[in-house]
Image (cartoon, rainbow, N blue to C red):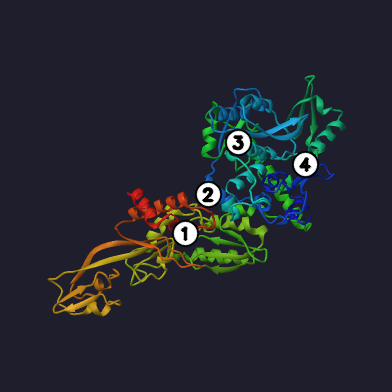
């Protein structure tokens, strides 16, 4: 049948994670034995969308969604090792973690892998006693049907234990609307697949996995009955098999056929997990624990852990997997085989062009000023890789027409020169600013310094949809701050110094909006018309005008594009610290109330909940 994911499955790229099947609202995806020791997904019946929906968007071999996930989770690797308080594989630490979560009511159930004579099956478990029964490692392909079962049972919060590919797919599920740009796919009955909320993701170290039929076949070839196996382990390139008569056998991993999709995987530790575990780097009988998020740090506190992990051993397997991945990709390119380049989404600011090549957006420098060395480096790099250069309307460089295989190399070369890629997707985009004072005769504020200050505070901050900030150095508003999510205008409010003003009329001459009148020997300003541009102050030859107030005029909730919306203006902001507080509160309030990620801009959120209510909450929190 015609299915968009056939492009992944038929070309040996499928990770066999099973996520496509659990997210399908019509439950029409199943795994079949292809006859080559692998089970792969296929459609049981015709799909109305032909796979142009949730199954494709969730697939970790289409894209990782890595950058947008990472800025929302703030991953940070911290290494420990320890032993759990129950018996299990390598110290039973996963079992201990899951028991802790269930017994402390942090989850209602755990989705993990059980087995029947080592044939893996995904199950959902709701009590700590049953968790202990699953406390052993299986090195074969398992899917995630237990997650769907949990949803059907009405279980609300779960922890999931999975391999790196599964962890990546489940992270994509958590952030699906931000990555897929829609809320999910309804089925024929108008309902979505019923799934529980995933509270914790526990990853398992993985070099590769095997099919159950292949495992059983290799064991039989070595005169081992799988029914007699008590435990499997992998050490030094061998599968170690403990039998029920207490004898131990070992078989070289070279005898096993790994899942084809494992060859294109570059993740050993499960880098998108909250916490990941494996035996590598720890003493015999202990488990290495890598915490990657705040939730991971929370879980690990239920066990007494040590920190002197042998990182060389962990990094060796990390690098081995990466090197094998690179070899496979190069081999596929040489043999003209399909490569999905799924990992490109680990990088910010990278997008696919209509011709299949990519562009790389470099986050704009403050106010669009670049050092000549930076410009020369960017142009030389563009020429080196056969690209073309574009300057965006927000003062950023984009390198276009880049072959996908060259993307990560170019991104890393840009990083070496402190040229950061990004400013694309649902986040705070590069701050747009005019040249400002010194650089422009009309400028009232130093837009370069303010732009840098804003960038330091909000660069790449995740938001519900794209979020733009513009700074105009004066009320001329050359960068259209009034129709930007946050618009900032430098202002200087004038006041007449009566004993110095002689009514010469110079201020009247330079005022472009007719806000000044001359009456006798004194000038007067109509405050209802004056836009606080400060021209009259600069132009007065007699020092008859001075600054009464200076600072910023702020616009909140503007928007351009298909619909033009002018933001609500707030003045009397006197310093940049106050300005930063208000912007921070706007972003937090927006993310609090916004719905429909990648669809609802700030202006729409303010309109929906009430502009007054929104701004009252912002200003109250900014105090």
Compute the Cα span from label 4 to label 2. Answer: 33 Å
Of labels 2 and 1, the one closer to you: 1
- Residue 177's place in the image compared with 501, above or below, is above
User: What mark, if any, has residue 71 been given in the picture?
Assistant: 2
Residue 55's spot in the image, x, y percent? 68, 51
In the picture of the structure, the residue carrying the numbered disc 4 is 258
Mark 1: secondary structure: helix
Compute the Cα span from label 1 to label 3. Answer: 34 Å
Residue 531's spot in the image, x, y percent? 30, 70
Mark 2: secondary structure: helix
Q: Residue placed at 23% from the left, 72% from the top?
A: 526
Question: Which is nearer the N-term, disc 2 or disc 1?
Answer: 2
Q: Do the residues bearing badges 2 and 1 touch, measured as CB atoms within 8 Å? A: no
Residue 290's spot in the image, x, y percent? 58, 36
Of labels 3 and 2, the one closer to you: 3
User: What mark, if any, has residue 155 been given in the picture?
Assistant: 3
Quadrant containing the N terminus is bottom right
User: What mark, if any, has residue 604 been given in the picture?
Assistant: 1
Question: Which is nearer the N-term, disc 4 or disc 2?
Answer: 2
Mark 4: secondary structure: loop
Apparent side of residue 334 relative to residue 101 in the rendered image (left or right)? right
Q: Residue placed at 12% from the left, 71% from the top?
A: 499
Q: Do the residues bearing badges 4 and 2 touch, measured as CB atoms within 8 Å? A: no
Question: Which is nearer the N-term, disc 3 or disc 4?
Answer: 3
Compute the Cα span from label 4 to label 1. Answer: 50 Å
Residue neighbourhood size for the residue with mark 2, other residues' Cα within 10 Å, grouped as few (<14), some (14–19), many (≥20): some
Q: Do the residues bearing badges 1 and 3 touch, measured as CB atoms within 8 Å? A: no
Residue 320's spot in the image, x, y percent? 69, 42
Compute the Cα span from label 3 to label 4. Answer: 34 Å
Q: Do the residues bearing badges 3 and 2 touch, measured as CB atoms within 8 Å? A: no
> In front: 509, or 280?
509
């Amino acid at each position: 049948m015609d299915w968009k994911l056939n492009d992944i499955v038929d070309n040996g790229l499928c990770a066999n994670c099973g996520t496509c099947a659990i997210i399908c609202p019509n439950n029409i995806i199943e795994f079949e034995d292809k006859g080559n020791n692998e089970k792969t997904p296929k459609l049981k019946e015709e799909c109305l969308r032909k796979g142009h929906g949730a199954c494709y968007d969730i697939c970790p071999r289409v894209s990782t969604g890595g950058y947008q996930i990472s800025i929302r989770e703030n991953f940070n690797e911290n290494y420990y090792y320890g032993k759990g308080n129950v018996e299990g594989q390598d110290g039973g630490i996963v079992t201990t973690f899951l028991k802790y979560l269930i017994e402390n009511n942090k989850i209602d159930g755990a989705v993990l892998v059980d087995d029947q004579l080592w044939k893996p099956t995904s199950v959902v478990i709701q009590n700590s006693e049953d968790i202990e029964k699953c406390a052993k490692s299986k090195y074969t392909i398992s899917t995630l049907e237990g997650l769907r079962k949990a949803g059907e049972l009405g279980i609300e919060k779960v922890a999931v234990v999975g391999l790196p590919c599964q962890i990546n797919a489940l992270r994509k599920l958590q952030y699906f609307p931000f990555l897929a740009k829609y809320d999910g796919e309804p089925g024929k009955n108008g309902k979505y697949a019923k799934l529980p909320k995933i509270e914790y993701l526990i990853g398992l170290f993985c070099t590769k996995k095997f099919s159950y039929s292949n495992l059983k076949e290799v064991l039989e070839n070595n005169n081992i009955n799988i029914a007699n196996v008590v435990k499997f382990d992998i050490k030094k390139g061998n599968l170690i098999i403990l039998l029920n008569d207490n004898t131990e056998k070992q078989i070289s991993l070279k005898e096993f056929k790994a899942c084809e999709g494992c060859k294109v995987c570059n993740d050993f530790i499960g880098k998108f997990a909250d916490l990941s575990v494996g035996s590598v780097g720890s003493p015999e009988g202990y488990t290495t624990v890598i915490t990657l998020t705040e939730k991971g740090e929370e879980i690990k506190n239920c066990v007494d852990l040590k920190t002197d992990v042998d990182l060389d051993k962990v990094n060796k397997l990390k690098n081995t997997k990466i090197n094998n991945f690179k070899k496979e990709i190069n081999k596929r390119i040489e043999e003209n085989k399909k490569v999905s380049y799924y990992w490109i989404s680990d990088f910010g600011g990278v997008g696919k062009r209509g011709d299949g090549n990519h562009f790389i957006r470099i986050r704009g420098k403050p106010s669009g000023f670049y050092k000549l060395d930076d410009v020369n480096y960017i142009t030389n790099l563009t020429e080196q890789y056969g690209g073309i250069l574009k300057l965006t309307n927000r003062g950023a460089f984009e390198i276009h027409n880049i072959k996908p295989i060259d993307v990560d190399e170019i991104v890393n070369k840009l990083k070496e020169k402190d040229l950061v890629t990004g400013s694309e997707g649902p986040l705070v985009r590069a701050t747009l600013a005019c040249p400002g004072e010194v650089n422009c005769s009309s400028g009232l504020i130093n837009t370069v310094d303010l732009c840098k200050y804003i960038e330091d505070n909000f660069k790449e901050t995740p938001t519900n949809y794209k979020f733009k900030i513009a700074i105009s150095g004066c009320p001329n508003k050359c960068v259209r701050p009034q129709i930007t999510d946050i618009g900032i205008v430098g202002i200087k409010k004038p006041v007449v110094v009566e004993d110095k003003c002689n009514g010469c009329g110079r201020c009247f001459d330079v005022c472009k909006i007719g806000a000044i009148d001359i009456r006798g020997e004194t000038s007067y300003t109509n405050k209802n018309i004056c836009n606080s541009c400060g021209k009259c102050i600069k132009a007065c030859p007699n020092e008859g005008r001075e600054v009464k107030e200076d600072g910023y005029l702020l616009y909140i909730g503007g928007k351009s594009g298909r619909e033009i919306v002018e933001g609500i203006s707030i003045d009397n902001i006197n310093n940049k610290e106050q300005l930063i507080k208000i912007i921070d509160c706007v972003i937090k309030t927006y993310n609090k109330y916004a719905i429909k990620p990648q669809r609802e801009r700030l202006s729409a959120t303010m309109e929906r909940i009430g502009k007054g209510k929104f701004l009252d909450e912002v200003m109250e929190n900014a105090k």
